[in-house]
Amino acid sequence: MTPHTDRAADPALQRLVDQVHTAQAEGSALLLRGGGTKDFYGGALTGKPLEVGELRGICSYEPTEMVITARAGTPLRELEAALSTCGQHLAFEPPRFGAMGAQATVGGMVAAGLAGPSRAAVGGVRDFVLGACVLNGHGQLLRFGGQVVKNVAGYDASRAFAGSMGVLGVICEVSLKVPPIPAASSTVELPCEQAEALRLIHAWRRAALPLNASAWHRERLRVRLSGAVAAVRSAVQKLTEESGVRALDDDEAQRYWDGLRDHGEAFFSDRSERANPVPLWRVSVPSNHPPLDLAGETLIEWGGAQRWLFSNAPAEKIREVAKRAGGHASVFRAHPRAADFLAPLPAPLECIHRALKQAFDPAGIFNRGRLYPWL
Amino acid sequence: MNGQGQEDPRAAAVWVGRQAEVLEALGKVLPSSALLHRREETVAYECDALTAYRQAPLLVAIPESEAQVAEVLRVCHTLRVPVVARGAGTSLSGGALPHSHGVTLSLARLNRILHVDPVSQTATVECGVRNLAISEAAAPYGLFYAPDPSSQIACTIGGNVAENSGGVHCLKYGLTLHNVLCLKAYTVEGEAVEFGSQALDAPGLDLLPLVVGSEGMLAVVTQVTVRLTPTPQLARCIMASFGDIESAGAAVANIIAEGIVPAGLELMDRPMTAAVEDFVHAGYDLQAAAILLCESDGTAEEVREEIDRMRRVLERSGATRLEVSSDEAQRLRFWSGRKNAFPASGRISPDYMCMDSTIPRKRLAEMLRAIERMERKYGLRCVNVFHAGDGNLHPLILYDANKAEELHRCELFGAEILETSVHLGGTVTGEHGVGVEKLNSMCVQFSPEEREQMFAIKRAFDPAELLNPGKAIPTLHRCAEYGKMHVHRGLMPFAELPRF
């Protein structure tokens, strides 16, 4: 754990601290920005930009500890390149949105908390955060967690920043667990209906096949098997013999999963450019729930736990179906931006949310309305 | 913490009056069989596994249902009575140490397994269900609950949630936090609240990481939905000997660098190996400076491939002897010593103090050398087991409590181990939690602003500050007092507090 006094030596960090102090004194709103690649996502963008992009660089990388620590403004691509030279990766496959040279940053990745196709198998963003240095609404630099996996000293505040959309504070630096890239990976596909796809995925999981990702769309199921060479090989063989699956070649497979991860895949991209695009919903439900009673083009990921849906249906209807299924639905992308992209919270949770906001950002300067309009 | 002030008759009278008031109020919501107030009934609740710290509570409530838990909380909130939740009381850090004017809320009777779902691979259980009981219930489906703290035969899942417990397999399978989907809980006011979801995420802020590991200070958890893992087809273990600590430490780093994530990776030093061999007679190599146990689990193909890779790394790293378990009985024999580290230590010394901290894996050799120096400095032996897979260290300092000044030296030894852990880039507690045991160390690991932020988080959940007050996060006042007694960066001895 580095001593607490060394932060002041960093001018970029000091600039951020100063801006926060000023905003706090004025009670004025700040809009936290990394690469701006997720501006389309979440609640309204309010406030004077606080550019975290200047705070960049990998502070330390210890492959034998499976830990990397990077400043929040570090481009995701730079981090991933460093990891791949040592055969490690961000197992949860965060999206890299952003055309025209815009680059996703490490801080933005954590703040948005979005994970890709492997999430159901390996865990979400939060599961890989080991620690973070954050700037709260008092302009105080706080370090929570650390660089080690087993650490139960105090509250796990660093992990709570994952998915917080910048409303609690500015992520300045984060330590992430970076496991090895699996020895082998293969993708197979099979034509089938949605209900059958869900049934097969669960059966294959029960059989302890090394299932790393799955996607069902338009009567076709694709799954990625990752792990030990022998395990992947025998799994592909078993699925070919028992279910008649077809294997994709490695390049096609890579393109497909990257397409799902970064939303370049046709399902996502075909609809985003139109004049009046249909809203894209992300429905998060228990994986074994049967097909949802919702009309619209749908793509099922995460073994059934993440269901994408293009739909003009009223928000209340979609939310009600998701809730009855034991989950929730959020607007992922809509134009114009949805007023409330997230499902409302029960009263006790809303109370805790307001109190936590007060605890970290009493003057309410950070990312007003970015998570909930009232936060 | 002292007793309830028996020496001061006025304070004692106030306490008795308060006890009667709370007893009467709780008697309206709980049957009398669920309320203990006589000293002979409550004495069993006066401590947890950190037996040196004892405190009689005002009374003990043992509800039989969630509805009763909610009622107890409502009553206590109205009367402003502190509430200390307790599972099996196996905490090694005093997390369940009662509050002198508080109610100890035992969750032991909430012990039903509600639902095991082999399709979604989850189980929903009440908080008082024992950790191992979850795996037993899941076994018929070829599933198990992965986090396996060594107290798993007794500890409850609610307690695991409170401490974010780990276990031998947590490098590969994660901590409690990574294996929990949803918590049903009650706030300090007795309102039902759900953290997480049956789905993989929930809207809004992710509160699960705050509540898991919160040592009973944010909410009282009554129901847990856990993730189950397919039981591995088989497991095999390599037992490797090393001629010096440095090469054992390097071997650990090399395994990880190879891209291997073993199911278990444990180290015992020579003195610990001698102690356990004498106890279990498993055929451990008494010449080795360190013994590494490396386990692989999965399908037959996965294990074959991984054992092969691990062997090559261990040989390359200078292992002087290598044995691979040929069957399950032998595998269990390899582990028997490691699992009996504590009782084996108890045989060779009247007392021992078990430390818990985490350091970056690569600093292991440095830490063990530092401990060797501390052995000479304090004139006490220290035997070590190390969850090498994740850097979690358990030094056991051996002493004789009958010799008062040995106890004092043991305290100083332990404190120096914790300080050294922080200095090497680690933390003062890997898995046992802070409780009361490490309150002072928290003054070293966190700045005043960080501690104040943690209090602010606590107040966001529990504005009345009634849930397990005084645990885990030291007050500014306490740290200031503690700081005054420092000359240098050394930690304060707990001279006035006995240890086991």
Image (cartoon, coloured by chain):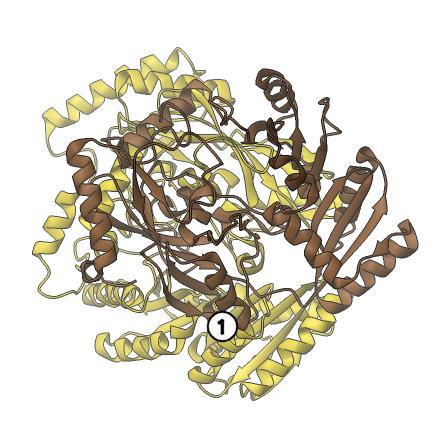
Specify the colour of chain A. brown
- Looking at the rendering, which quadrant does residue A230 occupy? bottom right
Locate residue A2, reporting x and y percent: 27, 63
At a point 77% along the width and 44% down the height, the residue shown is: A201
Does residue A340 lie above or below B395 as drawn? above
Element under disc 1: strand
Q: Count numbered badges in the picture.
A: 1
Side of A267 relative to B292 (left or right): right
Q: Which residue is mark 1?
A: B267
Residue B135: x and y, percent? 64, 46
- Residue A347: image location, x then y, percent: 42, 18
Is B196 on the left-hand or right-hand side of B454?
right
Q: Nearer the viewer, residue A335 or A261?
A: A335
Residue B209 position, x and y percent, is 44, 42
The amino acid sitting under disc 1 is Leu
Q: Which residue sits at x=58%, y=27%?
A: A329
Answer with the quarter of the image where residue B89 lies: top left
The residue at the point 35 percent across, 27 percent down is A375
B32 and B454: which is toward the camera: B454
Please state if B68 lies on the left or on the right of B402 as rendered: right
Which chain is assigned yellow?
B
Crowdedness of circle 1 by 10 Å Cα count: few (<14), some, many (20+)? many
Taking A16 as reference, is A192 above or below it? above
In front: B13, or B195? Answer: B195
Q: Is residue A121 visible?
A: yes
